Image: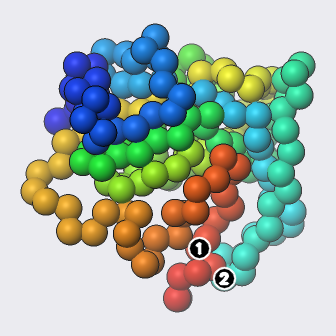
Amino acid sequence: MILSDQEILRSIEQGEIVIEPYDRTCLGTNSYDVHLSRHLATYRDRVLDARKHNEILHFEIPVEGYVLEPAINYLGATIEYTESHRHVPFLEGKSSVGRLGIDIHATAGKGDVGFCNHWTLEISVKQPVRVYEGMPIGQLIYFMVEGNILSPYNTKGSAKYTGKTHLPVESMMWRNQF
């Protein structure tokens, strides 16, 4: 079951959902709009290796915007810091963003109960497109969870993305044993 605007507000009031900064005008019928921060990153190496720590280069979107190019894997971040303590957050792109040919995640649209951070976006484009800091980039949708949560994400020793940061975070696949 997806939370309605009324249930999202109730969950915020009860501390089950945290969104900072929060702006009531960003609350939709059953979602909350999030915005692109000024922070972007790309991988240093052209060939990535799933077994090694692939370093990224951070840079900022200038006031005049930044042109994203096809065939480059950009990592971005949301301005909003979020926490979800009872609901499963899903991040989806806004239709207006999709119609510009921008994808904001390749596979990581679902968060976990206990996720407490800014969202890292896996941005790709189909043709060159200029983006700006603060533009609406996605929407968070919250799903109810049936049953008790035994291990919230932020308490798991195996969780790889728990360090609070406003910067995009590179893949931590290299921490897995395979």
The percent position of residue 87, horizontal first and vertical second, equals 26, 45
The percent position of residue 81, horizontal first and vertical second, equals 53, 40
Please state if 44 lies on the left or on the right of 24 as rendered. Answer: right
Describe the element under mark 1 as helix, strand or loop.
Answer: helix
The percent position of residue 92, horizontal first and vertical second, equals 46, 34
Q: Is residue 18 visible?
A: yes
* 109 or 46, nearer to the observer: 109
Residue lying furthest front = 14
Dot label at residue 51: 2
| N-term mark: 2 or 1 | 2
Residue at 68 percent of width and 51 percent of height: 168
Please state if 177 lies on the left or on the right of 57 as rendered. Answer: left
Residue at 17 percent of width and 36 percent of height: 1
Residue lying furthest top = 25
The residue labelled by disc 1 is 173
The percent position of residue 177, horizontal first and vertical second, equals 52, 88
Please state if 115 lies on the left or on the right of 142 as rendered. Answer: right
Please state if 58 lies on the left or on the right of 145 as rendered. Answer: right
Describe the element under mark 2 as helix, strand or loop.
Answer: loop
- Place residue 89 in its image quadrant: top left
- Place residue 169 in its image quadrant: bottom right
Dot label at residue 16: none
Display colour scheme: rainbow
Q: Please, what is the three-letter code of the amino acid marked with disc 2?
A: Arg
Residue lying furthest bottom = 177
Looking at the image, residue 70 lies above or below residue 63: below
* 176 or 15, nearer to the observer: 15
Looking at the image, residue 35 lies above or below residue 124: above
- Place residue 127 in its image quadrant: top right
